[in-house]
Image: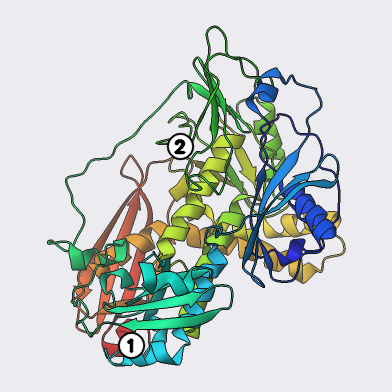
Amino acid sequence: MIMPALADAPIASAPTPLHLLEPLSGEEIAAAIGILRASRRLGDKARFVSVTLHEPPKEAVVAWTPGADTPREAFLQILDNADGCAYEAVVSLSGNAVTRWEHIPGVQPSLMLDEFFECEAAVKADPQFQAVLAKRGISDMSLVMVDPWSAGWYGAESAAYETRRVLRAMAWVRSAPGDNGYAHPVEGVAVIFDLNSQEVVEVIDTGVVPLPPQPGNYAREYVSEFSPTGAFRPDLRPFEVVQPDGPSFRVDGHHVAWQKWSFRIGFTPRILPSALARLRITAMHGPVPHPLEPLPDSLHSRADDASDASVPVIDAEARPMFVLGPARSGTSALALALLGSGHYEGHGEGHLLPLAHHLLVAVDAYYAGRDAMGGPDTRLRSTHVSAFQRMVRRGFIQVSRAAYPSGRWIDKTPTAEMVRAAPLMRELWPNARFIFLKRRVIENVASRRRKFPHETLENHYNDWVDVLTTWTGVRGHLGDAAMGFAMASTLAEGESFTIIELKINYFKPIWNSHLTVTARMVKRGRTTAFLECDVVDEKGSLVSRLASTCLVLRGEAAKGH
């Protein structure tokens, strides 16, 4: 992978880490590349295939004690596209020196991700490849997928490529953007591609084979296509794992202690990059040592893979608290009081949770932009937007669990963005509490003027209105969603709908209630529909009532055109 940003990295010694097996930090990787570039004057076409910790011998690890000198070294694999040569190097980070530089003849480093995309773009732009696909009725290159595979060895047939960095590229084609192209392989076509020279060496065509006609889409949005009933199975019940006393293991950085086991985790691109890898494990008797203590001699070994990884499960009764409201409405005072009670953790004003909302919006915007551009697809194939959305959600849940293991924490962000993120927070933490504070507009704006005199009166007022109106909209979110589901259940194939009017009446405040939302279709015509929705608390008391008028869309309008 080319790292242009690190090409001129400064030569600097990395700080002494806490343990001999601590993986390289980003600063250490930059330092190692800088030292090597300055020493060997690498050309512009040199790529760093990997930069990892050059681990000391087992004897040194066993003898190491906290506080002792820790010599740090980096192991680098380099590919020079100019001549196709592969090199290995060891860089001393403690001594700012290259201690080993060796040309490794007759080998090819592993495939890099950017080479994957370079190969696809070059093959799809090749006239001979396009002509071969045209024989099969394929002309839209934006729907074509090209994957590089091992070129293999076929005796005399492959002898001409023996010294070249070549791959055998295979092709698939989507029926539409977002389709699973792997269900439609282009049989009988293969391309030999040279990654160093970035050129198509040979296009192999063994004859036209019809494309498989059936789709292979199994993502959530395609359930109506692959499910016999057109819906998900209703017979699967929820499965919950709860540890009221917390997990029985402890994770501190890269050190894991579990019962009588203690080991350190290090990630490396050479072995199982997507799983736990390169473990130092020891079986122990007696109490678990501090994570900075060295590992005992007994059964000291390496495990090159692991079958599973777990995330701590918090107490099901633990409930995070989100304090919402306009600035200068008492949110800080309440958050500090709750933190001072000793029942909650946190930093009061986190501003972290709106980031989740921004990231999810950015994911949607990215996919919408890529689809609108219609250019070459640089995404990882048929990965759907929902997969990245789930990744963002899981990431924020794991961050909160790592920072606040008790599950009782506070985030206070007095902005409209925090209020807009409230439905997402409810989705991530279903048992969360929300407290919304407000003052009369005159009192709030007067307090703002005293605290922030540089802001105009108009800005103070508009911010108060923005937060309040946003909160009102969030309270109506549940009812709006329920009426949306009720409307969707009446649509025929090829139909969609849009809301042309929404009215909400609030009858009582909500504090700590279990709400039930019931939507009903009042009248469904050919072009319009009218729905109502009641929101009641656990006592059956009416909290709010919503009414919505929907317009039924058909044809191109139903597709959003």
Badge 1 or badge 2: first in the primary sequence? 1
Q: Position of residue 27 (x, y in %)?
A: 76, 49
The answer to whether residue 418 is seen in the rendering is no
Query: Residue at position x 45%, y 32% from top?
Result: 313
Q: Amino acid at mark 2?
A: Asp
- Residue nearest the observer in this picture, 214 or 282: 282
Q: CA distance from mark 1 to mark 2?
A: 41 Å
Give the left or right position of residue 95, taking residue 139 as reference.
right
Determine the image quadrant of residue 354. bottom right
Q: Nearer the viewer, residue 482 or 204?
A: 204
Please name the residue shown 22% across and 69% down the image: 522
Instruction: Point out the image quarter for the N terminus.
Output: bottom right
Q: Is residue 307 above or below residue 200?
A: above
Question: Which residue does the numbered mark 1 point to in the structure image?
Answer: 133
Query: Is disc 2 surrounded by few (<14), some (14 to 19) or many (20+) residues within 10 Å?
Result: some
- Disc marking residue 305: 2
Q: Is residue 541 above or below residue 133?
A: above
Give the residue at x 43% y 43%. 430
As drawn, 161 above or below 256: below
Badge 2 element = loop
Residue 87 in picture, x, y percent from top left = 66, 56
